[in-house]
Image: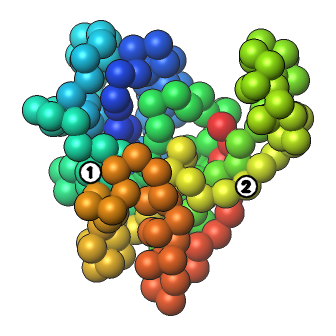
Amino acid sequence: MKVSVVVPVYNGGQTINETLKSLLGQKDFFDELIVVDDASSDNSLAIIKKFDVIITRHKKNKGLAASYNSGIRRATGEIVALVHQDVILYDGAMQNLIKPFSNKKVVCSYHYTHQPISLWKTYDFWQKYFFCRWVNKKIYGMNGKFDAFKKSVLIEIGLFDEKRFKSAGEDGDIMIRLRNKGEVVKSEAGI
């Protein structure tokens, strides 16, 4: 089964280098890496060009859902994994995310987020306040940060709704629209 990875980027110059290194460290578990630059005005594109990836660039900012859709349309894999520009994968994460698709009923596999205390200590007051309930816990959820989908099912349901969800809400909407299309399962893929 062919796997495509799509990374939407908008002014991700501070994080995209580490994200792409993290992904390429798990290259054995995917076939192509597509980065969609959503008209960044920082140095994101220059950083992305240093990597062996497929680049799609929007001429104007269209938002997260549109970036997902651009990458999904360009993807040649049966499975499409979405990865945010600021995600660092734990070892084996890509393999764990894709593993559930050996069951033909699975249409979506999602990850867990782990906030180690060492990272939490580097946050400012409000970040610490917001993430205090997550410290040293595995929080499972499908939120687009690191999730995989059967491409054919995404196409069937009309992809992400880029008219109503430019920068937030697209993850909840896609979960509702995936209902009755197959199984949505948690994986042991960690970020």
At which x and y percent is residue 121? 84, 16
Q: Which residue is mark 2?
A: 140
Cβ atoms at labels 1 and 2 below 8 Å apart: no
Quadrant of res 191: top right
- In-front residue for pair 163/27: 163
At which x and y percent is residue 133? 88, 41
Rendered position, 63 above or below 164: above
Q: Amino acid at mark 1?
A: Ala
In this rendering, the count of numbered labels is: 2
Rendered position, 132 above or below 117: below
- In-front residue for pair 89/123: 123
Q: Residue furthest left?
A: 59
Query: Few, some or many C-alpha atoms within 10 Å of disc 2 (few <14, some 14-19, many ≥20)?
Result: some
Q: Secondary structure at mark 1?
A: helix
Q: Residue at x 87, y 23 (%)?
A: 117
Q: Secondary structure at mark 2?
A: strand
Disc marking residue 125 = none
Q: Residue at x 28, y 58 (%)?
A: 162
Q: Is residue 79 left or right of residue 116?
A: left
Q: Is residue 191 left or right of residue 43?
A: right
Q: Which residue is mark 1?
A: 66
Rendered position, 59 above or below 152: above
Rendered position, 19 above or below 138: above
Q: Could you tell me which quadrant the N terminus lies in?
A: bottom left
Q: Residue at x 59, y 73 (%)?
A: 184
Q: Is residue 36 visible?
A: yes
Distance of label 1 from label 2 (alpha carbons) = 25 Å
Q: Amino acid at mark 2?
A: Tyr
Q: Is residue 159 left or right of residue 105?
A: left
Query: Few, some or many C-alpha atoms within 10 Å of disc 1 (few <14, some 14-19, many ≥20)?
Result: many
At which x and y percent is residue 10? 34, 29
